[in-house]
Image (spheres, rainbow, N blue to C red):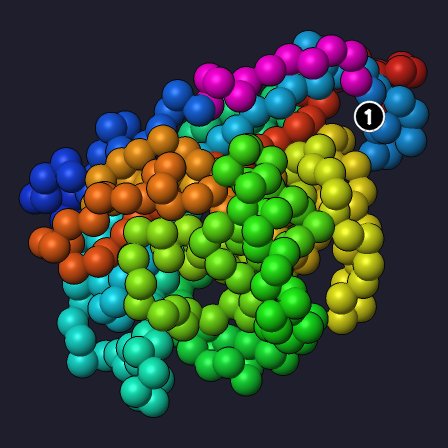
Amino acid sequence: MFKKILISLFFFVYLYAGPARPCLDPFSTVDWGVFFDELKFEGFCTCKNAKTGLPRIGIPGKIHLIEPIGFIEITNTPWNFPCIGIKLGSNVRGQGMSRGNGSGVKRTAVHYIKYPVFAVIGYLSDSLCQTRFPSSMDFGYIGEVQVGWQNDLFAAFEMPDMLLYGNPIAALAALPDCVASTAGHPINYLYYNAGCVGNIGMSTGFTYGNDPISESMLLSAKIINNLQAGGELMKTSDATSLPNTSLGGISMMAGNSMCKPKIYPRIIKSQYMLNLSYPTHWDAQEIGTIALKWALFKNRASTQDDVVMTVWRRRDCCAGIYVYSKNGN
């Protein structure tokens, strides 16, 4: 019911708000050029028929694409939705935004929004790839009601492996990952690190209150990590250098997802790009890219440090109309 109320408010505000918000103007605030830059047809491919186990041939063949799947909002004000410009008030539960320990550490509110315009693209690519993802406007993550986002202890229970990487030795991995990410090749094996923007660590909303634009990439990486851990997002690309292990009984074997998306419970950095869409828009970047390349001088005092990022996801699949190998089965 709560999600339906929020969606109704979105469309109500749409009638009266200007075009500056990404949810209201997904054309000028989203880097559509990256879609055409990444689109490739890569030749022959086969998949097995789910019923018969016999091979089937994809026509036109293997396709590589990148698609926008949603917006991530980062805000200092709980129940504020900067993607469209709605504030539901500051007197609701969950409004506290700091640890209160005098350390300067603050907690941000975040939301992941699956967007209807992107759903149309999702349907098209789903048809090509013969898969079906949920493709409707919805809130996939609301940080104000996520206990793990609000509390370090609960986050540690949700992702205990991340505790291993909250130390200076693990932090040294940031340097090579920073260089690789800025060059366009994030190191997937270092799934606990987001290159130049910091350590993903436990996926809570606490930050050090530095530049809100560059920190938005780190917080977005944390949300993507949470969504993959919960199965909301899956492995859809030919990502390399993924660790093969098991976390809490969930396999992290990096299976081939060309014929079917696979569950992989940690962020796959090379599978995603992030495009700054508010308070201004900028080209899509690899996760972990140095702030000097994309984040400087992008903030505006009037936006109160609110940031919206567009999430792009790469997909490699055996696309098109399938020719089945025997009697149409």
Q: Identify the residue at horizontal 53%, vertical 62% (top origin).
A: 199
Is residue 311 visible in this depiction of the protein? no
Q: Nearer the viewer, residue 122 or 155?
A: 155
Residue at the (9%, 54%) spot, across then down: 302
- The residue under label 1 is which amino acid type? Cys
| Residue at point 63%, 56% (across, down) | 173
Instruction: Answer above or below: position of 271 versus 101.
Output: above
Q: Which residue is mark 1?
A: 47
Residue 155 in view in this figure? yes
Q: Residue furthest bottom?
A: 101
Task: Tell whether 25 sits left or right of 153.
Answer: left
Q: Where does residue 119 sit, x and y in percent of width and height?
A: 44, 35
Q: Which residues are magenta?
A: 35-45
Q: Is residue 305 left or right of residue 179?
A: left
Looking at this view, is 296 or 111 the one in front?
296
Is residue 43 in the magenta section?
Answer: yes
Residue 2 x/y as whole percent: 33, 66
Q: Quadrant of the N terminus?
A: bottom left
Position of the C terminus by quadrant: top right
Q: Is residue 65 magenta?
A: no
Q: At 43% across and 59% down in the image, what residue appears?
A: 219
Compared across the picture, whether 78 is left or right of 47 comes to left
158 relative to 24, above or below: below
- Mark 1 residue crowding within 10 angstroms, few (<14) / some (14–19) / many (20+): some
Relative horizontal placement of residue 10, taking residue 178 as reference (left or right) = left
Q: Quadrant of residue 118?
A: top left
In the image, residue 207 lies at what x, y percent?
Answer: 38, 69
Instruction: Locate residue 116, reporting x and y percent.
Output: 37, 38
